[in-house]
Image (cartoon, rainbow, N blue to C red):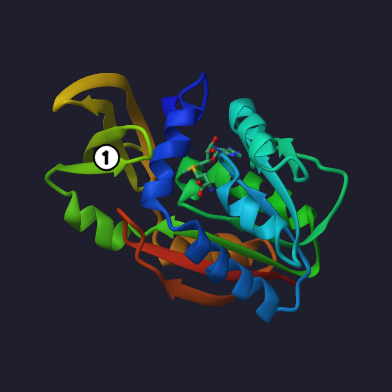
Amino acid sequence: MQSLYSNGLENIYDEMYQTFINYEEEFQFYSKIIKKHNKENVLEIGCGSGHLAKHFIHSTIDYNGMDLSNDMVKLSQKRNPTGTFHKGDMTNFYLNKTFDSVIITARTTSYLLNNVSVQKAIKNIYSHLDKKGIFCFDFIDANRFFKLIKDGKTIIHNAETRNTTYSRTSFMKPKITKENFMFQWDAKYYEIKNKNHTLITEDQSEVRAFTINEWQLFLEINNFTVLEIIDRKSYAFDTYVVVAQKQ
Ligand SMILES: C[S@@+](CC[C@H](N)C(=O)[O-])C[C@H]1O[C@@H](n2cnc3c(N)ncnc32)[C@H](O)[C@@H]1O
């Protein structure tokens, strides 16, 4: 797990990602899909610090959030005192209830590092969905992204928050291993004050991108029908959003 998701650093994640992701737009996008299929409730897996949750909780769609990081769950609960949040790993969870839709946003599928994890996550999601339930998620498109980073690429993201300016310097490069379309993502996070950069934390993580065909195959062999694949550019990555239905 990336260091920014726990141990106090989740607060910095929280500040920075609000400047990367427009959560109102994110809500409009996902809620439109949920409503289009006449679904009334949603489980968000990888709910992070509860920004998307806030919009759902104030809507007509009944919301549950889940995250692997206990610190993220606490932050979500603090932001949304009336919301329902669970600590859970998408590859191995049991919530004792089912939902008519499940979403995974902000490329959280990149943490499904191998095919066994993907298979386990899909099976867990399947068993938490009602009949004809909708599973909607995004992923980094390996086809486009790997061409962009094939020789290694440094990308800087600055985040001007209310009180502080943060900067993230990322170095990304495809990682050829026996695993799948993995890439190395080395990130350094700085706080900037009076033009001075102070290093807050750094990550060296291996994460995953997918091709459309991989997801189609995974879903179909696990009894989902792929309804739609939407090309949706995100702040840093070429991304597709998949809408699939439990058969
Ligand atoms: C990129 S953040 C996205 C958070 C949130 N969806 C947002 O838009 O701000 C990824 C989140 O997924 C969580 N996560 C990573 N692996 C997970 C897993 N196996 N199961 C559940 N959550 C996971 C992390 O703790 C983190 O909060």
Q: Is mark 1 on a helix, strand or loop?
A: loop
Q: Which residue is drawn at 18% across and 55% down?
A: 148
Quarter of the figure with residue 226: bottom right
Question: Where in the image, quadrant-wise, is ligand 1 located?
Answer: top right
Occupied quadrant, residue 201:
top left
Can you say whether 25 is above or below 32 in the image?
above
Image coordinates of residue 188 in percent, x first then y, are: 26, 27
As drawn, is 53 to the left or to the right of 228?
right
Report whether the residue tagged 1 is closer than 8 Å to ligand 1. Answer: no
Residue drawn at x 65%, y 45% as measured from the top left: 120
Q: Circle 1 sits on which residue? A: 176
The residue lying at 46 percent from left, 60 percent from top is: 214
Which quadrant: the C terminus?
A: bottom right
Answer yes or no: is residue 131 visible: yes
In front: 213, or 128? 128
Residue at x 61%, y 75% (from the top left corner): 32
Q: Can residue 179 be seen in this view?
A: no
Q: In this view, does 198 lie above or below 146?
A: above
Please give left or right for residue 208 compared with residue 90 in the image: left
Q: Residues within 10 Å of mark 1 (few under 14, many from 20)?
A: few
Three-letter code for the amino acid on which mark 1 is drawn = Ile
> Residue 111 versus residue 161: which sits nearer the camera?
161
| Image coords of residue 239 (percent x, y) | 38, 62
- Image coords of residue 34 (percent x, y): 67, 71
> Where is 227 relative to 99, above or below?
below
Residue 155 in the image, given as x and y percentages of width and height:
19, 44
Image side of residue 175 versus residue 231, left or right: left
All told, the count of numbered labels is 1
Q: In this view, does 160 lie to the left or right of 106?
A: left
